[in-house]
Structure formats: structure tokens, C-alpha cells
Image: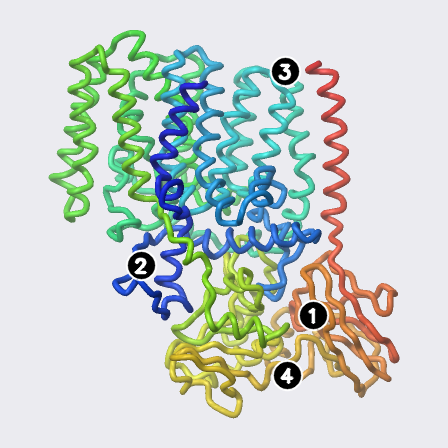
Amino acid sequence: MIKLVGLLLIITCILFFPYFVLGKTPFQANFMVTFFAPWNTMKFPGWEHGIPNKPIGLDNLNLFYPYKQLSIDLMKIGIVPFWNPYNFTGSPLMADFQSAIFYPLNIFYLLLPMIDAWSVMVFIQSILAGIFTFLFLSSLPIQKTAAIFGAITFAFSGEMIVWMGDHLVASHTILWLPLILYAIERRRLILCVLALTFAIFAGFAQPLVYVFVVSFVYALYRRAPWQIYSAFLLSIGIGAIQLLPTFELFVLSPRRTGDVGYLFDQFLMPLSHLISYLAPDYLGNPATYNYLGGGYHESMLSIGVVPFLLIFLVRRNSTVKFFWIVAGLSLLLGLNLPFVRWFYDLGIPLVSTFVPSRIFFINSFALSVLAAFGLHELLAKKSFKRLALLSILCLVVLGIWYLIKAKEPVMQRNLILPGVILACTVILTATKRWIGVGLFVLMIAGQLYFGNKYLAFSDRQFVYPSHPVFTFLQEHAGFNRFWTYGDGYINANFATQYRVYSPDGTDALFPARLGELFYATETKGQYAPSPRIDARIGRAREGESMLTNPYRLRLLSIVGAKYITDWSEGAFLPPPLFTPVWQQEQWHIYEYRDALPRAFLTSDFVVEKDSQKILDKIFENSGKKIVLEQDVKVDTISTGSAVINKYLPNTVSIDVDTQDNTLLYLSDTYYPGWRAYVDGAETKIYRANYAFRAVVVPKEAKRVEFYYKPNSFRWGIIISLASIIIGFFWWHRYER
């Protein structure tokens, strides 16, 4: 173990040299300020010739960092991070599985500055994956040297490296798999429960399903005692505090019903993709701006050339057969074959909504295990000739591929390095004495080259730097929302990072009705299912007059989008509807005069229940007339005022002044778990304008308060605590 940890630390220090020595961070901030508004219009002193960057990790920029920052900031001031009010006109935060609020390793965010905690969470993945894989391999009948080799292979496999650079939570989920298998192998109930639970809390659903399936099947294969199977139920019970709110959000999200056929078209790999086992950059690499394919991190297969060779040296035994089957199935389910497409078209819950190529996580782990067995066989049986023949055969394959398939210079160039490694392997087989050390060196060197090429490191000054546009919104917008016109589009989720309010949002899970409503601005008011990953009021193309789309104007009005940012001359936001309120260089901010207050009183409403009819009425109406789905009794004419006096993630307090029975409309997302109180007495929340909230306010009422108290979380706590208690008694009886 000491040797392994030493190697893991050395490799990590080399791979993350820019962080440990140069003070940079493994976060794609350079990419962000180079290509994303509003920073891409700025000039940064000292960077006149451009900021070096790698175009990877968009989800980290747009999702994981802002959500994590908000969650941690709320926890530090004693607020449970239930709700994110800054995007989607409000959306669940804790229930969003990827927020990973309960993940134990979040302790780093509480102890370290945010960007350093993020950096630790990136590089610790390979260290933990290596240690856990070594523990599992050491429990199998192979040499320690081979176990170390397999552990390093998986820890720095192509799949682990690209996902740690692109998608923080994915590899944190998968790294617990080898520890779970170790616990099954050693019959450690509590360790199995903990590892499964940590995988749940790590925050990525698709790899989590694979982890549970592979682990459970392995327990069956090993004929584990019944107590081990109970670990799966216990972990789900303990994870209920996360799983129940997430399930509630999933049911209400576009994921449950959306068309995902395009995922299979894009992410079922052709058979020609198998060449990437030897040459992962055959089609180029996005980090070097020469990638000719799509979804690079979604389609990674490589575990390294040397480990790939070693898997063919394995002698069959029951464990080897198991991992060959796992490797084979996890490869087949990611390939574009007729029966595979048929399988995904069956509509199996969850599976039919998955990105199919993400199963390559399991393929990489299974092949890493087989590579360890292969090295064990090589060292034990001295099967050097077989390794040499395999290397020569792969060289021939690369040569043929070079001549027949490699038409572009980048394809030809990126076949050279794998060829060199194969040639060195042939030479090593002749030395025999140093072959073990040589194969280690070749494997580590290859993975370091790959990791150094792909991983992005940024200067800390570019981690969400201030910008005058955000400064104005922070100082003047208050609770009003903003929206972006034309080419200066500001990614919606940046609003969360800067604590300003945008109606738009991008995420894996969000309320589908909001997405349907916003999408109607692109379908001329016709109902259509929500897009899978975003809710966005139809963007205005540069040069398009804002007056050409009345559906968009109406939506901007009812969500309270008072400010419109624009990076142009503003000729297409004509007065008097749009009034300039701020300008700096080419950036302008306009006030949209028809934007309604975020909260207002009204007695002007109609009732409709059919989705299309609701949309029709919304776009026919003007001003403060709203659409309800249930009738209410209020005065025909009412007057009064509503002023938001407190607006926190889980709480909204509104002072009202009215002498009539009326309605209070709040342009925040209607969602289960929100409760309303009028002067302390609970009252019903009605769905208004398809996706928002309204409550009846009796005359002379003074205050309306909204609190987010989700029952899914309450039941989750109860089930989690009960499961922990049961687990304690089982541990006391079974392991003690």
C-alpha cells in the first residue's frame, strides 16, 4: 500500500504541477473569459495576445461550480440549500442530484477557500480510485505488483481523466465501485453500506445505476451472504434524504417524458471507434482545438496502450470470466449495433434516458482489472513472446489504419505515439529482466502525456471575475430579473454565481412546466414538450427586432424581466418600450417598461385547465391579468399594493395592503413543498400563468409569507435515520 500511495502522489503531483507549483487551478476559467459573455469583450492587462485555454468543462463552468458555491455559502450561514432562486424563476437545489449536497467529501469546501477545495476535489479522485482499486485487486489471487499496476491503470485511465476535467461529480460516483467490490469480497457489511451510500451522495445518477448493478451482480457471482445484499437496501434507505427529493423532481422534469432518440444517434459509437483503445486521439483532441468528432469525454475508451495489450494475456478463471463479461457487455451497450438500439428503444425506466456511451466507465474499470491479471500472468508465466506478438499485431493494425482510414493530418499524427509505445513494448520483451519496470514506465508516461494534454489549468484571476454588467445588476436590479439580447448572450446559470436573477436555466433536472411555457415563445404559443436540459425564453438573434416576437415579450413581462442586457448599438430594442439605463463601451442595459413587478395584487383572472388553452390565454392577455387552473372567489375590482420585504432561497415575505379580497401573484416557480401563510394562517397556493404562484389575500391582510418545506425531504430524513439505526443494530450483530 505504501508503494502504491507513493506512486499515486508522485503521478498526481506531476499531473497537477501547475496547481502545486504555479498556483493555477484545474478549472476552466481561462476558457470562460475567452469565449463567454460578458468577459469575452474585456481586455485583461498583460494578456494582449490572448489567454491560453482549452475548450473543455462547460458543465463545470455553467453548473457545478455555481451550484456548489451557492450550496456551501448557504450552509455556512445556517440555511439548508433547498432552493435556488436565481435561475429557472426558482428551482430545487438540494433535490437536483448533481448538487451533491450530502457528499461527505464536501468537508473540503468548509475547510478551504472555494477554488482550492474545488482543486482538491479534482485531483483526489485519482488518488481514491487508485487506493480503492488496489484494495479490491489485493483481495484477489494476483501479485501485489499487478494490483498496483491495475490500480494506477484505472486511476489515470482516459475515462477518469476526461471526466475529472469535464464533469466533477461523475468520476466521484464511479470511484466508489472498487471499494464496494472489496467490501463484498471481504464480507464487510458496514463498509459496503458506506461505500454505496457515498456513491449515492456523490451526485451523478447514471454511473450510480451502473455501480449498483455491477456490485449486485458481483455479490451474486461471489455468493455473498444475505447480509451483503441488505447493504444495498440500507444504502438506499440512508440515501433517501437525497433520493426522495430527487425522485420528486425527476417525475416533474422533462427527463421522464422527453424524446431522447437523438442521444442514441449521437452517443452510440460506430465500430470504427474501437481504434481509440489504441489511439484515443485518433480524431484529435478538443483540448488542442483539432477534434473532428463529437462528445469527446462521452466516448472515451482508452485505458492506455500497455494495459490494453495485457488484457489479452489473461488466463481464464472465474473472476476473469466475470470481468470479461462485464467488459464485453459495457462495450456492446455503447456501440451502434441494431440490437443495442432495439434495447434502448424498449423504454426501460431510467435506462432509456441515459447517454449510452457513459457505460464506458464500467468498461474502463473492468479492463483495468483484466490488465492487472494480465501483468500477473506475464510475470508468473514469462509469456513475453505472446506480448511481443500482440504488440506487433497492434502495430500492423495501426499501420493498416494509417494507410486506409487516416485521411486527415491530425489522424495520421495521433497514430504515431501509440505506435512508438507498441514498438517500445516489443523491445522490452527482448530484455525480459526489466520488463515489469519498463511496462510501468510506459503505462505511466502514456497516461501523463494524455492527462497533461487534456486537463486545463487556469489563472485564478479569471475565476468568475467581476464585470460592470453584473455589478450594475447586483446594485440596481433588486429582485427583478434580467435577460440577454443577441450575440452578447450571458449564460443563464452565471446568474447563480453572481446572485442575480435570470428566468432561464440549464440543468439535468428542472420543472418541466416552466420549460414548456418558455419553449412556447419559440413555437408561436403552441404547446410542445420541454427541451431536455434547459428552460429558456426564446433567444433574439442579433439584428432581430424585439418587437417581432410578441410571445417573448409577454413572457418577459410576466416573469418580471425588467432589465435587458445587450452588446450592440441597441437599435433593435426601440423606445419607448425599452429605455436605456446604463452603458459602458458596447454594453448596454435597457429597462423593459412592460415588465410586471415580481409580486402584485390582481383580481383580473380567467380559469383554464387544458395546457394549450392556458397558453392561448396567457398570450392573449396583457397587463396583470392571469390564468388560474381553479376558480377562486375574490372581489371583481380590487386595489392595493404588494412589496417584497424579504427574499431568501427558502423564504419569501411580501407586505400587502388591500381593502378587497384579491389575489397575490408571485412570478416564482410553482412547485410541491412551498407553503403560503397569510398573516400566519396557512392558505392554498394556486398555479398561475402555467408555472407560477398565486394565493387568495383577504381584505385588510398585512403579510403573505412563502416557505419551502418539502415533504419529500421530511420523509427522506425519517427513512434515512431509521436506516442508520437499523444499520447500527445489524453491524452490532453481524460484524461484532
The kind of residue on which mark 2 rests is Ile
Picture quarter with the N terminus:
top left
- Dot 1 falls on a residue whose secondary structure is loop
- Whether pointer 3 and pointer 4 mark residues with C-beta atoms closer than 8 Å, the reply is no
Tell which tag, 1 or 3, sits nearer the viewer. Answer: 3
Residue at the disc numbered 4: 621
Report whether residue 349 is seen.
no
The kind of residue on which mark 1 rests is Lys
- What is the number of the mark on residue 225? 3
- Measured in 3D between alpha carbons, the distance from the residue under mark 3 to the one under mark 2, in whole angstroms, is 57 Å
Tell which tag, 4 or 1, sits nearer the viewer. Answer: 4
Query: How far from the left and from the top, in percent, is residue 118?
Result: 49, 45
Residue in the picture at 19% in, 35% down: 417
Q: Residue furthest left?
A: 403
Residue in the picture at 46% in, 84% down: 548
Residue at the disc numbered 2: 51
> Would residue 296 be found to the left or right of residue 587 on screen?
left
Tell which tag, 2 or 4, sits nearer the viewer. Answer: 2
